[in-house]
Amino acid sequence: MNIVVCLKQVPKKDSILRIAADQKWIDDRDISYEMSEADAYALEEALRQREKHGSGEVIVLALGPERVRQSIKEALAKGADRAIHLHDDIFNSATDAAGVARALAAALKDEKFDLVFTGLQSDDYGFAQVGLILAETLGLSSATIVMEVQPEGDSVRVKRELESGWFQWVKIPMPALLTIQSGINQLRYATLKGIMAAKKKELKEVKAADLGLTAQALQPAQVIEKAYLPIKSKQTEIIAGKPAEAAAKLVEKLKFDARVL
Amino acid sequence: MNIERETLEMDVLLVGAGPANLSCALHLTNLVAQHNEKAKADGGRQLHELNIAVIEKAAEIGAHQLSGAVLDPISLRELLPDFEKDAPFEAPVGDEKVYFLTASGKIPAPILPPPLRNHGNYVISLNKFVRWLGDKCEAAGVNIFPEFPGWEMLYDNNAVIGVRTGDKGIDKNGKPKAVFEPGVDIVAKVTVLGEGVRGSLTKQLLKQLKLDAGKDPQVYSVGVKELWEMPDDRFPAGSIIHTMGWPLDSHTFGGSWVYGMKDRIINIGLAVGLDYRDPKIDPHHEFQKFKTHPLFAELLQGGKMIRYGAKAMPVGGWYTMPKPTHDGVMIIGDSAATLNGERLKGIHTAIKAGMLAAETILEALLADDYSDKILSRYETRLKESYVGKELYQTRNFHQAFDKGRNMGLMIAGISTLTGGRLPTRLPIKAGHEHMQHQQANGADRYADLKYDDKLTFAKLTDVYYSSTAHDEDQPCHLHVLDTNICIDRCTKEFGNPCQHFCPASVYEMVEDKESRKLHINFSNCVHCKTCDIMDPYQIINWVPPEGGGGPNYRNM
Amino acid sequence: MSEGILLFIEQRDGKLNRTSLETLVAVQKIAATTGDTTSAVVLGQGINEVATEIAAKKLAKVYTVEDDKLATYTPDAYVGALKQVIEKLNPRMVAFSHTYRVRDFAPRLTAALGKTFVTDCISFRQDGNDTVFTRQIFQGKINTDVRVQSAPPIFVSFQAGSYRADLAEVGDAPAAVEALAVDLSSVDVRTQTEAPFQEAKQAVDLTQAPLIVAIGRGIKEKDNIKIIEDLAAAMGAEIAASRPICDNEWLPMDRQIGSSGQTVAPKLYLAIGISGAIQHVVGMKNSQTIVAINKDPEAPIFDIADYGIVGDLFDIIPALTAEVKKAKGE
Ligand SMILES: Cc1cc2nc3c(=O)[nH]c(=O)nc-3n(C[C@H](O)[C@H](O)[C@H](O)COP(=O)(O)OP(=O)(O)OC[C@H]3O[C@@H](n4cnc5c(N)ncnc54)[C@H](O)[C@@H]3O)c2cc1C
Ligand SMILES: Cc1cc2nc3c(=O)[nH]c(=O)nc-3n(C[C@H](O)[C@H](O)[C@H](O)COP(=O)(O)OP(=O)(O)OC[C@H]3O[C@@H](n4cnc5c(N)ncnc54)[C@H](O)[C@@H]3O)c2cc1C
């Protein structure tokens, strides 16, 4: 069983985010990065599937600048077998989901795999699209927001999360792309031995030109015109009166003004 | 719990990725390379390629590092002669001012006191600096393992043979979780502790081997700082201000710094001596109050606070330095009190200490003898170096403050003028012993301190800006050895000062109908070590939490 | 020339998904500024009722697409069918609600058509001929205004709760319902589905709860939580808490809101005896309506509340429970 895991690196959860001077993105100086949460679960699921299956490879595929190596190394330390890093300035043009998916698809053209895992969405842009665009481009079957994975012969049976506490099992033929939900498993820790072993694993750097891609081809079709902190223009209405009066007034407001009851 | 543990063999293991250990690791790889080149030429014995490991409790190098900092480049120039090419420094020190503050005024120092003169030095961010140094180490083949705290010293008789790293995946009741990963026994020919201030392994080791016998107790200060992003260049990179005086009372040692950094960032902080008397003193609150001084309220006007942090530092110096070596082990940097308390500088001394340790380790490798016989040469080297000289000269500095600020300033003045010579060696007691019982009707020191979320911030708001996080499902890493003291004696005698001296609101006394108890919000902990130091009963034992937990300092 | 806005209506077992009505409001608002005609499309089988329900709203037309292959939802059949619908109708814009189902097929659809898809938007602004969409990044910490730079149709999805379904405009007369034929014979449906199910015991997912009653240390003791449970039951709300409550294990960890807990944005967040520390506030500040009950008039929670009552929660909560029951006619 060969599984490709697409990894994205994003600012750490607890980062204090500031808007960049050009108001197009965050100020990315002095930010620490980590694997996007759902991607970390996707990696873990791939490692577990491979271990259960007993053979095959887990291949990490990541696009991004130099700093992404740190997350790739972490994935290798946890047990991935090899990694492909799409890394040069041309890839910086890919700022929408389609551009990223196009580059990832190009990198997978010559790879042999049964499954491709991505996170269900990234913690930064949150497009929730890259996986499916990749599936469409490569002609793979797909299932999203996956909570359990059971390979069965040439197919894979997966438990999808639906809204409001509902789930559904679906079966799709392999090769298939699954977008993995956070919490599907428990993340392992990288071990010292794993970290040492990772140093010897293959980490292939791929340039856009190697894939026949140009900045033009990766141009985004949607762009962030402005990034800003959500504006809360709230006026707090203090409701006075004895408890019973205040309670009655509040219910009235919630029912008729805010219409939330 | 009987756990099977793996063993990892290394030549040299360094605990803590601070300037001391990273310099040691880098210098050692250089020395070995030089040695081998020479041996090759002369047909001498070559050393095999060394396995050097640095373990660090933070999630990445530098994430637990907080400093001023003004760097004296003297030792860095020896380690990396062309550091100016790519070192991530903010700026060379430019405009320098020193004031003595009163509640609303300032008295400029007529001349810059020599210890505060910084011409030729650099304003730097320590965590940027160590990340850069870490990259150099990795490029030289050093293994750096973030997220692996040293948990326990490993001994063979009394010789140190390595360190056990912390277990991962233990739940809050102490039971292994499904992903449990036991700590590893890293055994090494030489183990170097460069854990920084009040190292938890260092504490174990000093106790086990009595390496601090006959030394003065260490004294500490805690520094609380914020970074501010300014709308303009009003305080250019490289500008510095130091102050003494207000708001600290005359029994409290300390002072402030304001350093201009790149990109319109102001770095402002206050160091408070951890030998104050009033148990109600709260370093975070003192710092907030300090910022309301007209000088700083005006300076920060229109800016935005973007980061917060706190860390202690050992300021005792010469007479407090433990014996730094024993069979198989060395202690370097802040862990062994190489900081110069008078200049408030410990980075250059830590770097030099690391280099001298490396030179000693090379000798041990060549002799294949890792006993104290060879390792103890480090102490001699250190004391004979310029680090030894500057520490010796300032040997009476903090001790002088033991007598209170005014007296202290005078003595320190004399001491500076006379190259450290005082008629007699001053007696000293541990910082926490200075704390006095609370006054029954003592005034609230901070009654008029208001948090406006513009200039001043509540402690928890500040803690948010330290980006601190721990996995909540793990045992509390702050071991309070006897909580009965907290609810009884300490409440009466000191009014639970842990609630005040902790700059991260970790300790809280909570009351419900029938009881009053200590609640420890361990996940707020910024790893400053103040509680371990300042608790009047010395019943708080700080141990590292699961690897990776703690603050995430950037640019601090 | 592409023209008009097409709204995707989601249904399961012939039941309308309410979020489609929210997106209808967005679509009506866009059309009000651009003069676009608006139509809706429903896919499935046995969908007449849904179509009729939607046709009552102010829309030019409601299209129904029925096919055996659409009886149960699969991404392949939906992509195949909608591709043909879009090619036939040639709309200028296609709007979805950002539901789990839409997330499961719409990116494939847009990729198949070679179009860009602006997902999970919370609002829009018309700028000349362009519609500029607002979407959140970094899990709601930052807003962005996004402009599409490719030729129509523009694909967009709106986050649940961004618009209020009850504000959907009703038409003067019901819109015409028209069946659209599609040919799915060449569509290879690769997904075999099983029946959806609910798990017996599941962790609460507060992110899905429309109403949340949250308690903080002001509740004083575990036993007092009872009065909050009564209120929550009367309102049909989920209970959440600040960290100290979960630290004390008075409520399980999965009910903690804040930086080390869940991030939620319900329609109503009632904060009771919560001071409003920044670590708590980051987890709930995007709630649509925030009510704070606290005895300290200076408590920071009031800074972000829409409504506040200053007073003792032990007096106010029982009164509030009684009022809620009264309002619900119990
Ligand atoms: C507020 C403040 C201001 C200062 N200003 C200046 C200044 O202006 N100029 C100057 O030169 N110096 C200054 N210093 C002092 C200087 O920062 C220190 O002297 C210097 O950082 C010491 O280096 P070190 O390598 O010994 O320890 P540290 O820099 O403290 O590094 C120790 C490392 O070890 C890690 N560690 C600790 N325990 C363990 C364990 N058990 N397992 C794994 N890892 C562990 C820590 O996380 C840390 O990363 C200041 C210090 C403070 C606190
Ligand atoms: C790293 C870190 C992570 C954290 N993560 C979280 C998190 O995820 N979630 C979280 O909630 N907190 C978190 N915290 C803790 C947070 O900082 C606060 O300590 C916590 O939110 C306070 O909870 P509280 O408002 O319930 O309690 P308090 O701050 O004690 O407030 C209690 C409030 O109740 C009011 N009150 C008391 N009695 C009454 C009464 N009878 N009637 C009405 N009002 C009354 C008081 O006026 C007060 O405002 C975190 C902290 C840190 C440092």
Image (cartoon, grey):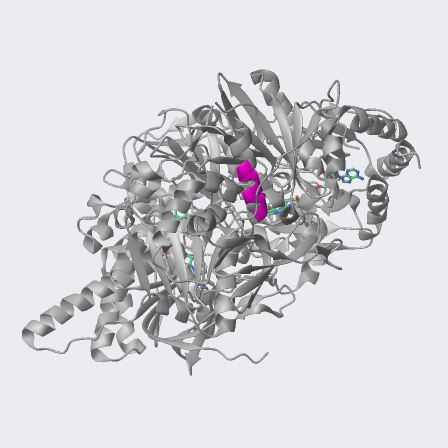
Question: Which span is picked out in magenta?
Answer: C77-84
Q: How many marks?
A: 0
Ligand 2 - quadrant of the structure image: top right
Q: Position of residue A63 (x, y in %)?
A: 37, 49
Q: Note whether residue B221 is visible.
A: no
| Quarter assignment of residue B362 | bottom left
For the point 64% across and 46% down, the residue is C70
Camera-nearest residue between B457 and C283:
C283
Q: Note whether residue A225 is visible.
A: yes
For the point 27% across and 65% down, the residue is B357
- Say which quadrant the C terminus of chain B sits in: top left
Based on the picture, tell me whether residue B308 belongs to the magenta stretch.
no
Camera-nearest residue between C206 and C102:
C102
Q: Position of residue B448 (x, y in %)?
A: 62, 30
| Vertical comparison of A258 with A30: above or below | above
Q: Position of residue A150 (x, y in %)?
A: 57, 66
Residue farthest toward the left in the current orientation of the protein: B42
Camera-nearest residue between C98 and A199:
C98
Q: Position of residue A36 (x, y in %)?
A: 48, 50
